[in-house]
Image (cartoon, helix red, strand yellow):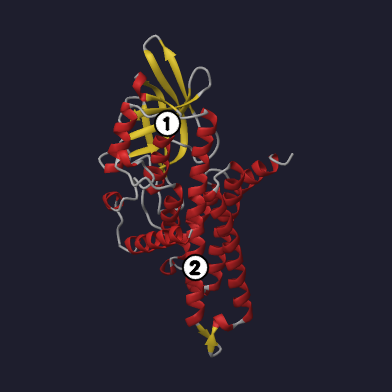
Amino acid sequence: MSEFSEIHDELRSVAADLLAKDTVDWPLLVSAGWVGLDAPDQAGGAGATFAEVAVICEELGRAAAATGYLGGAVLAIGALNAVQPNESRDALLQAVVAGNTRAALALPGAGEPAPFDLATTRLGWRVHGRAAFVPDAAGAQRLLLPARDADGVAVLVDVAAAAPGLTITEQPVLDQTRSFATVMVEGVEVDEDAVWRFDGEPEAALGALADRAALAVACDSLGIAQAMLDTTVSYTGVRRQFGRPIGSFQAVKHACADMLVRISVARQLVNAAIAAPAPLSVSMAKAHATEAAVEVAGKAMQLHGGIGYTWESGVHVYLKRAALNRSLFGSPAEHRARISARYR
């Protein structure tokens, strides 16, 4: 376990150094090996697990980095790993890992995880449907559409982003560090080799993809909260009032202690979900971590005083990112309802 922790500490340190650069573009993420981190060795990946991906997600949140990692790597690679191996799937997986092609999973930010329908007509197979708040779809060359066939079975459909009948419309959001889009599919024709079956029970595999998205966002929120606590402790240690640092005032100490407690609980829940990714543990982590990040970022803004409400402080960037995370892939209320349903 100690060796495992040391590997994560080293990965975290490398990630922090890389994300400290002014611009972190897609080729840099590919060359760092992050895109194919949990892709299998035979596809050119590192053969790691989601535990390593989670480290990167947390560091991205800590840096409030503007990258396409969530949609282009975490979700796309997760979806490709989840389907049965075949020639076309293997070729796309290798291309994504190598950085030759960018793919995005059209998993909506809320609601039904398979919003597309695969229909059989006399002309062949066609796909219809719409997904909103799809991460990083605008920069992708290939779209992976979670769909249901005529029998209601969940499948994954591979479609070129430029295919006739497929429209990608960017959706402006308050968080300017990330990109979302609406994917509209109106009768896109697909070949048989572009329809991929999930490996294992289809509904369980589809649910696991949705949980992967929720857990990745929880990790991002954990990084946001930790960054806000670190920044606040540093600021209150040097900001002086009445002849002494404001961090020496009891009210400020209590506020920072409350922030630490919220983060500690969130970290325990996130780590538990990473170690054993089940629907219950993921919902607990997503509900608490994303809500905690909003509270911690809001408290950080207050403790920074007047400067906390200015663009120069940068706190608003984290607060807006935390607020979006809270609603993505299930709100805290929705995840708590999911948890309570388990005990009925």
The secondary element bearing badge 1 is classed as: loop
The Cα atoms of the two marked residues, 2 and 1, are separated by 46 Å
Residue 309: which disc?
A: 2
The answer to whether residue 26 of the structure is visible from this angle is: yes
Q: Could you tell me which residue is drawn at 41 percent across and 29 percent down?
A: 84
Residue 342 percent coordinates (x, y): 69, 40
- Within 10 Å of disc 1 (Cα), the crowding (few <14, some 14-19, many 20+) is many
Residue 223 percent coordinates (x, y): 48, 60
Residue 261: which disc?
A: none
In the rendered structure, which amino acid carries the disc numbered 2? Tyr
Q: Could you tell me which residue is drawn at 34 percent across and 62 percent down?
A: 14
Q: Is residue 341 above or below residue 83?
A: below
Residue 149 percent coordinates (x, y): 48, 20
Question: Does residue 32 appear to the left or right of 61 in the view shown?
Answer: left
Q: Is residue 231 above or below residue 130?
A: below
- Within 10 Å of disc 2 (Cα), the crowding (few <14, some 14-19, many 20+) is some
Question: Does residue 335 appear to the left or right of 43 in the view shown?
Answer: right
Q: Could you tell me which residue is drawn at 29 percent across and 32 percent down?
A: 91
Residue lying farthest to the right in this orientation: 344
Q: Could you tell me which residue is drawn at 56 percent across and 55 percent down?
A: 289
The secondary element bearing badge 2 is classed as: helix
Marks 2, 1: nearer the viewer: 1
Q: Is residue 108 above or below residue 309?
A: above
Number of dots carrying numbers: 2
Residue 320 percent coordinates (x, y): 49, 56
Quarter the C terminus occupies = top right
Kindly indicate whether the residue at mark 1 contacts the one at mark 2 (C-beta within 8 angstroms): no
Residue lying farthest to the bottom in this orientation: 243
Q: Which residue is under mark 1?
A: 83
Nearest to N terminus: mark 2 or mark 1: 1
In the rendered structure, which amino acid carries the disc numbered 1? Val
